[in-house]
Image (cartoon, coloured by chain):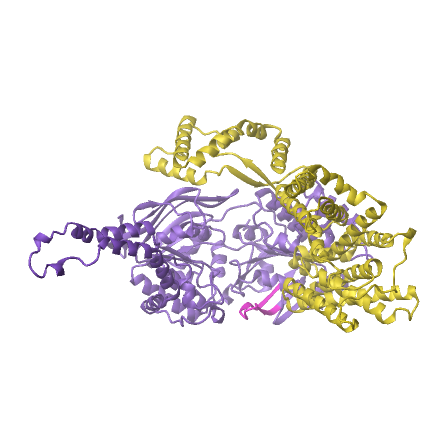
Chain colours: A purple, B yellow
Amino acid sequence: MTYKQYQIGGNSVEKTVAIELRGITKTFGDVVANKNVDLDVYEGEILSILGENGSGKTTLMNMIAGIYFPDAGHIYINGEEVVIKSPKDAFAHKIGMIHQHFKLVDTFSAADNIILGEKCPKFDLKEEKAKLVEAHRAENEAYENYDEAEHPGPLAYMAKPKFHPEKETKRKLALMPLVGIGRRIKFNWLAKKRADVVQDIANRFGFKIDLKKKIYDMSVSEKQTVEIIKVLYRGADILILDEPTAVLTPQEIDKLFDVLRNMKAAGKSIIIITHKLNEVMAISDRVAVLRKGEHIATVNTSETNEQELTEMMVGKKVSLNIDRAEPHDVKNRLVVSGLSAVDADGVKVLDDISFEARSGEILGIAGIAGSGQRQLLEAIAGLYKVKDGTITYFDPAKDDAPVDLRSKTPVQIRDLGVRLSFVPEDRLGMGLVGNMDLIDNMMLRSYRKGFMFLDRKSPKKLAETIVEELEVVTPSTHTAVRKLSGGNVQKVLVGREIAASPSVLMAAYPVRGLDINSSYTIYNLLNEQKEKGVAVIFVGEDLDVLIELCDRILVICAGKVTGVVDGRRAIKEQIGLLMTKTAGDVDENQMSIDDLHDTNNDEGGEAL
Amino acid sequence: MRSVTGKESKFDAFVDKLKKESPIHIAKRMDAPKWLPIVIRIAAVIVAFLVCAIVTVFFEPTAFGTFFTEMFRGTFGTERRVINLFWEAAILLLIALAVTPAFKMKFWNIGAEGQVLMGALMSATCIFYLGGKVSEGGLIVLCLLASVVGSAGWTLIPALFKAKWNTNETLFTLMLNYIATALISLVITVWVKSGSGVVGIMPYGHLPKLGGQDYVLNILIVAFVTVLVWVYLKFSKHGYELSVVGESINTAKYIGISVPKVIIRTMIFSGALCGVAGWLLVNGASYTISTTIAGGRGFTAILISWLAHFDPIIMAITSFLVAFMGRGAAQVSTIANIGGSFEDIATSIFFFIIIASEFFVNYKVKFSFSHSKKKVEGETTENTSEDDSSDAEMMSDTSQTTDSEAQTNEIFDESVPELQTCQSSEDRTCDVSTQNKEVTE
């Protein structure tokens, strides 16, 4: 057992280390997901793992849970080094992880899901037989060594064993396989006791759940409860929860936190991955901050505050030297107001979003992944159903006459003469067709021209131009796009979208997974478009890039606009705070358009 | 990364052991030369013939030589047999062409059998009720129209359900096959009052015999349809749209393709071609109707379409080979007296081996074990001596653990020098040689 000392409010407390990570490194290809991470988790504590998207939180936890195997480093549990190479191993070490996407069988009840996959204790026939022989050995010996002379008297026959015990032993041995089957039947079909055990666990930690309910009848929070009970039932002492609150309502979050506190009181170690600062402050004992795969620090929650955590999370500003020209001839090109939308489950994904994109400007959209960025862009492009609000486009070809884009299909939008280009987040799944070559992918935008038959000449020319101008590395224009590297795929996609000479260009995470050079090619392309007077909307995740590239940055959180900041004056921490804000006081950060123009003119260069 | 302390090096060794590769190494072919798949497939066809010949020997010890001669005599022996062969290939090709647009769209239509039956039924109905009452030419055209409409309508049912409610088209089309068969049984019971259940040869609506030969016109029609489908898939907007839908529904939506519309349109096209097949079977070949008129071709055609990777020209070659195998085997079974099922057995062997060869087209198999692998790749580490010793340890470990493993080590020791050359310069060619060995084995 390893004991570590650490300070809580000045008192030195001795705590047992449950799990210890030393020098954990994991790379995926060229991308370093985790670099030399050291981390301790104590018994009976709640540790938050805090970090931006792509900071390696989930990867790190997956390595503890046996989903990934670290490239280097050591894991110690209760002071002993362990190798976890599968979730099974993790369970053997009493580690359980509750993933963001639940892994439950829909048509089973909660109890069935919880006991599902539990192994019947192994019945080793040889071993059992040996045991039986051993057990009967004394009797056998007694029979064989029975000496009538030792038991004189009329009642001697009563003392003599009636049957030959060896026969008895043989009979039992012959029946042994049946015993094995019997135990299996008892285990599989007479599982009442296990259901009781499950109920006990639920009661002990204060879960309120009907274990007979089928999963398909359950709400998201109930499903999560089932997942947690499942892990506890397997005897986990270390529980990892991957963004457990992302899918819950505030009331459900409170309930979950109560349960977590109960578990903590029962001596379990709980690791919770999150990027919501208020929750970190509310629930955790300590916070470990990760940034770009590295462990920055672990601090006691009571000794820190949101401001400090944000600073650790986003880090010092890194200068990228992206050129940024002054916007000129700025006009409203696309105005979105009061936009709301719900997903298939009826959950609000866009909530009263209003903003304007202007010609000759790059508007950045910042936010934690899944805050509604994808739905917002798709709603504008006519791909996502809008519930409320308006989307208005001002057509530069028609003297800025307003055009209503709400609830139009992509074809209708194009037929209205709206030159809207969209670089979606999912390049090969949406923007391009992976199995088609460059020419056919160019044709996606232009194939409708002409009658019946396809014209491959102009797409071929376009493909050749793009390959040449954007330096796409490809064997030929007849190569399937999926065979190209990520950066080249993106160049093809962006190139095609720009070739349509758009007046609004939307790009979702256009540099995700790209190397430095390709990233700069994309930045330059966006800047070129901006100079041409295109209204560019750039959804990004790297705050440094957003701050250096964009003229204005719209920050959204959980489908709501939490602020609009000037790219030239923006401070990383400020955006970080806006990104993690759940509700309320946003107005102070919102700047009026007039303000913005002033700052553009006065202090434009300063921030650079 | 190798460290000094005993504990850590032990851990490293453990990790190495985990990463130790199995003796058989399967990897996806990334940049195979263009001719390689063709060579592998030709080799597979040869192997298929050899295996069939060997199978005949089991039944008839003297049949090995006769197998090949009879194979060709059965297919190319007489003018009649040549035309029969081409007709069999043509009808398989036509149905394969019919299912191809749907498969390219990733609509798993396995109801071609039923769709052909519906086309045949509609055509036979026209002949039954209108035969003799309208002119022969008019009747043939009416039959064609009825077949096309009937078959397309039959295909439209699963298409509509898929487009509207996203039902599972595989189950749907499969079950429609049984309904189509049952419908034909019903109609035959109504038509044939004698209760024999056999509609005799109907005297009307026969397609003209070009050059006095059966099937010649049929074959020409199929040739025309082949070109039509090839152009449709490759050069028309419809063909482009359906491949985009097949590749990614999200992309299709993104560029504004109406997915339900494409599904319905493509399935009508597919069904119409099945109707043509049904029409040819009734008016151009059997001149009657029965539940077995499609003869399982609706399913064989699915395999042909897949094996040809949806390319109409390659489909023509594949269906020719399948027809050749079937016809030839039928002749062999008659001559060598080994029973009527031999045709099916031969076709199955053919498909089995051809499909298996696709594995070798997509993957390469290498034999190696950790020690030789490391040397081959020329992996250089800082302290080589330590590395070697640890590897040797591991090797001795494995050879001690199980006899069989030690045996495999011995066997694959011989292949080590060959692998070394593989890795050095002539990577590809060497791969091929091992590959071909694999295939012929």
| In this rendering, position of residue A577 left or right of residue A435 | left
Magenta-highlighted stretch: main secondary structure?
strand
Which of A507/B277 is in front? B277
Could you say where residue A185 lies in the image, as x and y percent from the top left?
Answer: 38, 62
**Residue shown at 63%/36% (left/top)?**
B440
Task: State left or right for residue B294 relative to residue A389.
Answer: right
Nearer to me, B129 or A252 = B129
Left or right of A242 in this view: A163: left
Magenta-drawn stretch contains A354: yes
Residue A81, percent across and down?
33, 44
The percent position of residue A331, horizontal first and vertical second, equals 68, 61
Front-lying residue, B123 or A461: B123
**Count of numbered labels shown in the rendering:** 0
| Residue B194 in sight in this render | yes
- Residue B8 placement: quadrant: top left
Foreground of the two, B25 or A592: B25
Residue furthest to the right? B135
- Residue at 28%, 56% in the rendered image: A8
Q: Which residues are drawn in magenta?
A: A337-356
Residue B378 in view (yes/no): no
